[in-house]
Image (cartoon, rainbow, N blue to C red):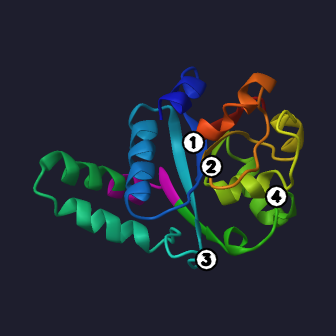
Amino acid sequence: TKAIFFILYDRHQIRIDIIVDNAGLELICDLFLADFLLATRVAKTVTLHVKSHPTFVSDVMAKDIPIALETLASDREPAVSEFANRIRQYLESDRLQVREHLFWNAPLFFWQMPDSLRQELDRADFAIVKGDANYRRLIGDCHWDKTSSFDKIASYFHPAFAVLRTLKSELIVGLQPQQIDRADLVYWCILCRCGG
């Protein structure tokens, strides 16, 4: 979250889209991030992109969000229930939006995205792409040289964006040569393209 804040620190009242990954604690963390971005007015709106059905058992669907909020709202800790109420208010006011699309379930690369979804994402000022599978979909699931330019490979994806992933596959690009030997020690990875 700190890394994303530093990327966005000089931006205000922008639209941020988050392509979410897993339900449970990870979804709660995504909602905390949305709360932070909206409360600090870095974002005017946040849009969560979720799957229409679970391809994997942990995939987030729209119906998972009210369930999570119901659980949080019933917590005995006032700060937790207040957080749930803020998220509900953001949803009611459309500052936080949830959009399902079958593309997130499809075995397609990001450059094969339907025009309607591409146009939707193009309206974002910044996107956060989460998960190892989405990272692989961005780079075509290809074994690029590890020093290949992430910016060039993903140049077709128009909004400025950050990718947050846990390394579950050997595919990675954008490394400096001296980083390759240490890549086995890397547990998670943030890649950014901050240009438009």
Instruction: Identify residue type, mark 3.
Output: Thr
Tag 4, which secondary structure? Answer: loop
State whether residue 131 is above or below residue 39: below
Q: Nearer the viewer, residue 114 or 140?
A: 140
According to the picture, the residue beneath numbered tag 2 turns out to be 167
Separation (CA) of disc 3 from disc 2: 19 Å
The residue mark sitting in front, 3 or 4, is 4
Q: Marks 1 and 4, Cα distance to the nearest angstrom?
A: 18 Å
Residue at 73 percent across and 51 percent down: it is 170
Q: Which mark is residue 55?
A: 3
The secondary element bearing badge 1 is classed as: strand
The C terminus lies in quadrant: top right
- Left or right, residue 188 beside residue 94: right
Residue range in magenta is: 88-97
Disc on res. 142: none
Three-letter amino acid code of the residue under disc 1: Trp
Tell me which residue sits at (21%, 61%) in the image: 73
The disc, 3 or 1, on the residue closer to the chain's N-terminal end is 3
Q: Give whichever of discs 3 and 4 has the lower sequence position.
A: 3
Confirm or deny contact between disc 1 and disc 2 (CB under 8 A). Answer: yes
Q: Is residue 87 left or right of residue 48?
A: left
Q: Residues within 10 Å of mark 1 (few under 14, many from 20)?
A: few
In front of the other: 61 or 89? 61
Three-letter code, disc 4: Asp
Query: Circle 4 is placed at which residue position?
Result: 141
- C-alpha distance separating marks 3 and 4: 18 Å
Depth-wise, is mark 3 or mark 1 nearer the camera?
1
